[in-house]
Image (cartoon, rainbow, N blue to C red):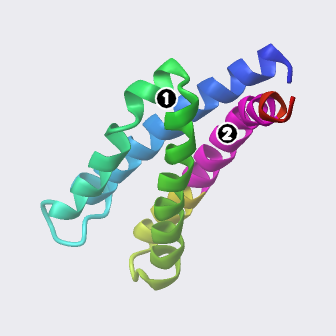
Amino acid sequence: MNVQLNSRLHWAAVFFLTALTVLCLGWELWWAPLLPGGTLLALKAVPLLLPLRGVLKGSVYTMQWTAMLSLLYLMEGAVRAWSDISVTSMWLAGLEIVLSLGLYLSTIFYVRPAKRAQRAARHA
């Protein structure tokens, strides 16, 4: 894979992870919290902080489990897009779907060349 493309995927993953974290915090504290003044649901952003260091470094292992973590946010976004009553919350859920899907795809495609090389080395 092209090194330049891999670098773009790395920075895309950093962007999507950061944006998803900001969205989770802003959504539950200020923009459309379930209760006025914010809720403890904002703690859903904490798991997104765990892989931040590894994603910034470009760690293949961290990128792998971050891809799986992003699927939880994709599911939450899908559920809340179709079940929330507030229009603002529905739009934020749609944004969560886009950001988590972007995070998933960028991490998966970043990891793909490393996994291929590992598989080729094992069979050689």
- Compared to residue 96, the image places residue 26 above or below, namely above
Residue in the picture at 54% in, 60% down: 71
- Residue 105: give x, y in percent of width and height: 69, 46
95 or 20, nearer to the observer: 20
Q: Main secondary structure of the magenta part?
A: helix
On screen, residue 27 versus residue 58, left or right, reads left
Q: Amino acid at mark 2?
A: Ser
Residue in the picture at 57% in, 60% down: 97
Q: Is residue 26 something one can see in this rendering?
A: no
11 or 39, nearer to the observer: 11
91 or 62, nearer to the observer: 62
Q: Give the labeled residue for mark 1.
A: 55
Q: Is residue 36 something one can see in this rendering?
A: yes
Q: Amino acid at mark 1?
A: Val
- Residue 46: give x, y in percent of width and height: 27, 47
Work out which residue is located at the far left of the displayed protein and give it: 37
Q: Which label's residue is closer to the chain start, 2 or 1?
A: 1
Residue 105 falls inside the magenta stretch? yes
Work out which residue is located at the far top of the displayed protein and give it: 4
- Residue 86: give x, y in percent of width and height: 39, 76
Residue in the picture at 53% in, 35% down: 61
Work out which residue is located at the far front of the displayed protein and give it: 124
- Say which element carries label 2: helix
**Numbered mark located on residue 106 in the image:** 2
Task: Tell whether label 1 touches label 2 (CB within 8 Å).
Answer: no
Q: Which residues are magenta?
A: 98-119
Q: Which picture quadrant has residue 95?
A: bottom right
